Image (cartoon, rainbow, N blue to C red):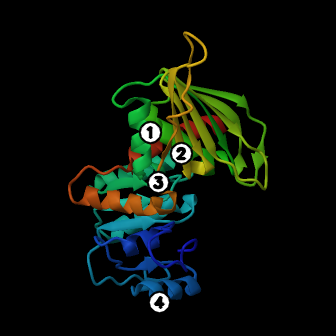
Amino acid sequence: MGYDFSESGDEKVLTHARAFDLHPDFEFVGAIDTDAELRESFTQRYGAPSWEDIEGMELSASVDVVVLATPPQTHLPLTRQFLSRLNPRVLFCEKPFGTNAAESESILELCTEVGVDCFVNYMRLSAPAVHEIRDILGSGERPNVRGTVWYSKGLRNSASHFINLQQHLFGDVTEVQVLDPRCQSSKGLEPDFRLGFGSSDITFLAARSHPLFHNALEWISSRGVMSYALAGQEICWRPAHRSEVYDGVVTLSTKDRGAIASDFQRLQWHVVDQLSRHLRGEEGNLCSGLLALETNRIVDILEN
């Protein structure tokens, strides 16, 4: 709950609770929170019971999905507790999936032991726009892309989103280089670094511009330039074409600039919709626990 608790309609869906409430394929069984005021607000808003802890949980129905929207240091112990009490089909964990790769791996092992699918809320992977980006930059192949990422509010908290996104787009990280390790913020380390993805090369730069929050990407390929601004709220593709001014020169088109609809205010709804597809036995565009583990491994390398 939180960001969109007072919203009506479905134009803005920013939290797990609102996304599940609005989706026709799901209904709440209950919620757990240590804050009594939040529990009361949840029950009043969504009409489902809530409890202070797992031990006090009294369920009248089976559970298909357990959502861990809690601080990273709680993910592993809460996974142990939930899987000892429940038999869900899916564990859906908030990013960054534990505090490090070792904890991520332990969570995955616990899920595997009892046959529970594990996904992590790197929400951009469920956005329709990201699949359009993938098709443009080179679907089904290893694209040759150079890019720059600006990020704010910490390596693990914020930059991990864009590491994960580019693992999805370009494949495994093949090279890690720290360019400037010095900066520390209230959200943790904020190094400048470079990641290689086979034939693609991406540089990450910490904005270090508090209080300005700035997350943005730009990818350049032989096909054109893709901008991903305002953390993905504004996405634009400008294809390459032969210059009308200079013979033999390829430039960016001034006529074919195309905005790609992001539906950014409803990203969490798209995540839940893809989760519904997965539960129906269809392919869902979600961040698997395995991919989130690989993201945490890269962050661990950069931190250490």
Q: Which residue is mark 2?
A: 235
Tell me which numbered mark, 3 or 2, is placed earlier along the sequence: 3
**What residue is shown at x 47% (from left), y 51% (from top)?**
261
Q: Is residue 21 above or below residue 250?
A: below
Q: Position of residue 125 (x, y in %)?
A: 43, 48
Residue 44: give its label: 4
Residue 243 in sight here: yes
Mark 3 belongs to which amino acid?
Met
Residue 171 in sight here: no
Q: Residue furthest front?
A: 245
Q: Which residue is mark 1?
A: 133
For the residues bearing labels 1 and 2, Cβ distance under 8 angstroms:
yes
Q: Quadrant of residue 205?
A: top right
Residue 123: give its label: 3
Real-space Cα distance between discs 3 and 2?
Answer: 16 Å
Q: Position of residue 213 (x, y in %)?
A: 71, 53
Real-space Cα distance between discs 1 and 4?
Answer: 40 Å
Tell me which numbered mark, 1 or 4, is placed earlier along the sequence: 4
Real-space Cα distance between discs 4 and 3?
Answer: 27 Å
**In the displayed structure, does residue 165 sit left or right of residue 212?**
left
Mark 1 belongs to which amino acid?
Ile
